[in-house]
Image (cartoon, rainbow, N blue to C red):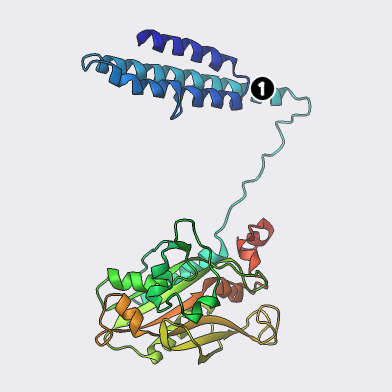
Amino acid sequence: MSEMIREILVAAAGEVEAAADERVLKEVEVKYLGKKGLVTGLMNRMRELTPAERPGFGKSVNEAKDTIQRQIDSRRNGLKAQVLMKEVADPFYDPTLPGLPEVEGSLHPLTVITQELEEIFRSMGFIIPDYPEAESEFFNFEALNIPSDHPARDMQDTFWLKDGNLLRTHTSPGQVRAMREFAPPFRAIFPGKVYRYEAVDASHEHTFHQVEGLMVDREVSVANLIHSMKVLLGRIFKRDVKIRLRPGYFPFVEPGFELDIECAVCGGKGCSVCKKSGWVELLPCGLVHPNVIRFGGLDPTEWHGWAFGLGLSRLVMMKYQVNDIRHLMGGDLRFLEQFR
């Protein structure tokens, strides 16, 4: 075994010295010190030794590992120095030129709005648990009063995974998970990314952000729900926001409503974002359906709740007057630098 370690040390030293650049040196490092490297593999030979031999062998292997690592670090520093000296020797090199300015980054507008929204709801007594983006069919559909034969399943296309799970199509699964996790009464919001297999246009994306909100108590009302939403929107936009409430159908609430906000991009005149209507669908909401309360493990004759699903991506569009939702996930620095 000791002879094997010596052979590895000699071979490694030669390859480290022969490495002409950092890429080759990295390959040598992986060959000897990686998870499947030659030195790492020596530890697997430990079972071939007697208990008395193992401590000494393990010490020798660790010493060999340290030796090779020092050689690699030294060679890497030497290669970096060679590159620097080559640059300095360039006849066009001017050490008096100013260095490149440091570019200060910034938070993504979605992150800014999410943090602001979380702070608003915390001040209203809401907790913010986190739940997985890869969901089971039960929590995404069944527990939300959407059985396999329910026509509502045709309302949204789904990204299915090979293991039978799916990428959540809304943040609504948080309702049931929270009712199973926290003792009522409680208030909670669930911000996060959601996925829908649908056509992309100025106001629709296959990947976007939502925040689900839930309040569970012995007595709740639509009036309390509307008040909470007005407080939220007023604090987000820093002004009174014109809204409208109209009946809406959602399997997990009864009664259900659509809360629309006047389009901030066109001021209600009509544009591609609001589809020329002057209004943007922002906040489906309603009183939690008794079946969902039951799936959450609570008695609907004792506990009641209201819930809403806020489109964070659309809220950002209204806040900053962005006319195409695709900008938010596009990664275009020219767009993102505007929010620095």
Instruction: State the quadrant of the C terminus.
Output: bottom right
The spot of residue 147 in percent (x, y) is 42, 76
Q: Is residue 36 left or right of residue 155?
A: left
Out of 44 and 332, give the one closest to the viewer.
44
| Residue drawn at (61%, 68%) of the image | 205
Residue furthest to the top in view is 3
Q: Quadrant of the N terminus?
A: top left
Q: Report the residue at 40% width, 24% height from top.
A: 40
Q: Position of residue 322 (x, y in %)?
A: 65, 72
Local crowd at mark 1 within 10 Å, few (<14), some, or many (≥20)? few
Viewer-side residue, 308 vs 22:
308
Residue 240 visible at all: no
Judge left or right: residue 13 versus residue 276. Answer: left
What x and y, as percent, mark residue 288? 37, 83
Query: Up-down: is 317 above or below 305?
Result: above
Q: Residue furthest front?
A: 149
Visible in this render: residue 272?
A: yes
Whether residue 213 is situated above or below residue 34 in the rendered picture:
below
The residue indicated by pointer 1 is 85
